[in-house]
Amino acid sequence: MFSFLKGKQPPALAAPLSGRVIPIDEVPDPVFAQKVLGDGVGIVPSDGALLAPADGTVIQVAETLHAVGIETADGLELLIHLGIDTVKLGGEGFRCLVKEGQKVKKGERLLEMDLAFLRGKGFDTTSPFIITNPDRVASLQPLVGEAVAGETTVLRYKMK
């Protein structure tokens, strides 16, 4: 009875980067830590490959290649910001593999960042992963710990 409810999980977003997932309020940038731009998690990356956290459309690629925006099929707007203050690098240390308007699948490679280069230049590579339109979300459950890009769920949510 009620087998249609069995195993039904709320929608989820995968880690866009492999590494240690931390609460958003621990991100060492007050704009992200105070949720000025939205809510989500931070990731201290162990690898520089940025993968799509869900199926969607690339809606923004920062001119300096340090951030990517994706809109999911259900209307979530996601921002993955690579490192702290990395806009100052003017794109150096990043390689973009997608363009605005491109459809992407969960786990597809979007961008690469050279972690050794960024760290060598003194940049913190902690990368905020946020939902920038949290008004569309009824509930959000961040999941912290170790994550594998494209595989490990880091955010569960329920739409309004």
Image (tube, grey):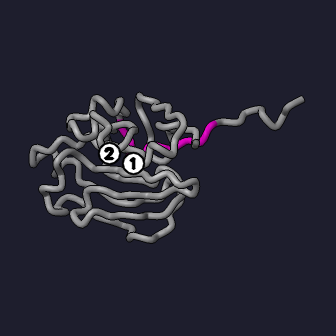
Mark sitting on residue 37:
2
Disc 2 and disc 1 in contact, CB within 8 angstroms: yes
* Residue 123: image location, x then y, percent: 14, 45
Quadrant housing the N terminus: top right
* 147 or 127, nearer to the observer: 127
Residue 103: give its label: none
Membership of 46 in magenta stretch: no
Q: Is residue 116 left or right of residue 43?
A: left
Under circle 1, the secondary element is loop
Judged left or right of residue 22, residue 14 is right
Please tell me whether mark 2 sits on a helix, a strand or a loop: loop
The picture quadrant where one finds residue 158 is: top right
- Quarter of the image that includes the C terminus: top right
Query: In the rendered structure, which amino acid carries the disc numbered 1?
Result: Thr
The magenta segment is 10-19
Q: Nearer the viewer, residue 16 or 84?
A: 84
Residue 2 position by quadrant: top right
Question: Which residue is identified by label 1?
Answer: 132
Q: x, y percentage for residue 59?
A: 41, 64
Alpha carbon separation for disc pair 2 and 1: 6 Å
